[in-house]
Structures are given as structure tokens and as C-alpha cells.
Amino acid sequence: MTDSDTKASVLLYQGAVTASACWLAAILAFAAHLENPWWAAISAWVVASPVRQALLTKAADRIVGTILGCSTGYWLTLWGEGRPALQTAILFMVAAVGTYARFRSKHSYAWIIGAASAMMILSTGLEAPGQTYYLALSRATEIICGVLAATFMGLVVDLKRRIAGMPSAPTEPTPKARTATMDRADAIRLAMMGGVTIILVPILWSWWHLPSLTQTIVSSFVVLDRDVLSTRFRGVQRILGCLAGGAFGLLTIWLGIDSFFMWSIMLFAGVEVDTEKSGAKLTPQPQNWRSKSARGFSEAPRSRYIALHCRAKIRRVSFKTTRTF
């Protein structure tokens, strides 16, 4: 067997494991009657990794960041409710602190997720103040479902390899102790930019009547990078990725799939094909992946496809069928 055949086989296997994790996460979310099961599936894809240590680290960061972000966002929303000036100041501070810690902390991913979750709750307080508690609880539960599904699948595969006497995961060098990735002065500058950007979003949202304040705020936060070129690069990839993944998801909706079996096949096919094309899950991320957005284009299509695919399941399949999950 040639190296290319071996790589294709490994990609196929890893794609199947990732797709299984996404499928299991969606089923758990459906069984719990959660409002946005695509968050569970997306979380499973983001956390899934053939490297056990990377899987567990990212799973812990995502759960801790989500819980702290949702709880902090909820209490800050209650504190600022009905006071626009205070709400603006709170949004600025959350975005600024999240941006600063994102580039300075060794738990960068937890800070990204925590700040994004808090801003989601805060923005919901501007759109629909009465739904903040439900959204905070629902989002935390959806994320936990996805992380548990990915962790379970990863550990099952790892155990299977150990029993078979195979290496537990693709090896990668033991990471050195991580230090701050950016100078303090540069991090403060970016934090101010992040805070100002986020408080401008509600203004643009109200002027242009955009459909979702929450998604606009989160997108503005995650594309911000250490320089203009990197930010532009991430922004272009996010737009192209969302368009490509959205088209794939809309195709699933257009086909009008009402069968649970066919829905599962489409979900597996979407994640599997994307894994085959990108191979990003099996390649250790370069040290500067946050600045160069190494995951980039491969992440957005999968995430958008999974989101639309799960949404199609909710809309197309009857409640009677859904209850059998």
C-alpha cells in the first residue's frame, strides 16, 4: 500500500469517527429537546481530534469557557437591563477582556469561547430580554452534549487501538510550556479595537436590519486578528466558508429528506467529504495558526453545513419521528 493510499485510508477512518461524533451529538440534543441542536453537532466537530491530549484539552477549554461565559453573560445582562449606556459599556469590556486574554493566555481557546458565549447572551438581552436565561441554559447544554459525544467517540477509538496493540493516536511532539503569544502593548491595542468593534455592531444591526445580532457580534469577534492582513484573511475565509457550507446545507433542505436514515447518511457524507478534502484534523496545527488562520476555510463549511443540516432535520421530520430518537 502506497503512502497516498495509507493517508486516504486514515482520512476516511478519521472522517467516519468525526461524523459519528457529530451524529451522536445531534441525537443527544434532539433527545433533550434542545432548541439549537446544531450547536451540539458543531461542538463535536470542533473538539474531535485523533490526538487524545488535544481532544481532552480542547474539550475542557470549551466546556469551562462556555459555562463561565454563559453564566457571566446572564448576570451582566440582568445588571444592565434597561440601561443602554451600561449595556454598551459591558459589551465593550467583555469584548476587550476576551480579545486581550485570547492573545495572552495559555488557555486562549477557553477565552475565545467564554467571551463569545457571554456576548451571545448580552446581545440576546438587547433583542429579546426575556429569553436570556433560557438561551444561557440551552447553549451550555448543547455545547456539553457535543463535547461529550466527541470525547466519547475519541476515547472509544483510543481504547480500540490500545486493545489492538496500535499507537493510541498519531504522535506529535510534546508541546513546550506555552508563553504569551503577543506583547502586552499590542494585546491592549487589539483589545481596544475589539471593544470598539463590538459596540459598533448593534448600531449597524439596527440601521441595516440584519437578521441576527448575535451571529453578527460573534463573527466580528472571532475574525479579529493581530494585524489587518490576518483579519482580512480570516474574514474572507469565513465568508467563503459560510457560503460553501450554507449551499451544501440548503441542498439537503431542498431535497426534502424526511427519513431519519437518509438524514444520517447526508450528515455522514457531508462531514466525511469535507474531512477527505481538507485533512486538517490529522495535521498538527502550525505554531502561528491563530494569526494565519490555518484551520480557516475547512472549518466554516463544515460548521455551516452541520448547522443547516440539523435545522433541516428539525423542520422536515415530524415530532413523532423525532421522539423516537
Image: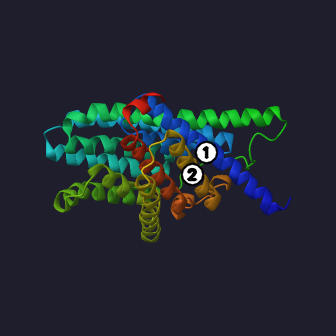
In primary-sequence order, the first of circles 1 and 2 is: 1
Q: Residue at x 75, y 53 (%)?
A: 9
Residue 178 horizontal side relative to residue 209, left or right: right
Give the distance between the C-alpha atoms of the residues marked 1 and 2, in whole angstroms.
7 Å
Task: Note whether 213 is above or below 80 in the view shown.
Answer: below
Give the residue at mark 2: 271
Q: Residues within 10 Å of mark 1 (few under 14, many from 20)?
A: many
Kindly state the secondary structure of the residue where label 1 is placed.
helix
Q: What percent of the width, then of the height, locates residue 220?
A: 35, 58
Q: Is residue 106 visible?
A: no
Q: Is residue 178 visible?
A: yes
Q: How many marks?
A: 2
Q: Residue at x 45, y 29 (%)?
A: 31
At label 1, which amino acid type do we have? Answer: Thr
Q: What percent of the width, then of the height, locates residue 49?
A: 63, 45
Task: Note whether 34 is above or below 182 in the view shown.
Answer: above
Give the residue at mark 1: 18
Q: Residue at x 30, y 31 (%)?
A: 134
Q: Which quarter of the picture shows residue 189?
A: bottom left
Q: Are the residues flagged by discs 1 and 2 in contact, CB closer than 8 Å?
A: yes
Kindly state the secondary structure of the residue where label 2 is placed.
helix
Q: What percent of the width, then of the height, locates residue 212?
A: 27, 52
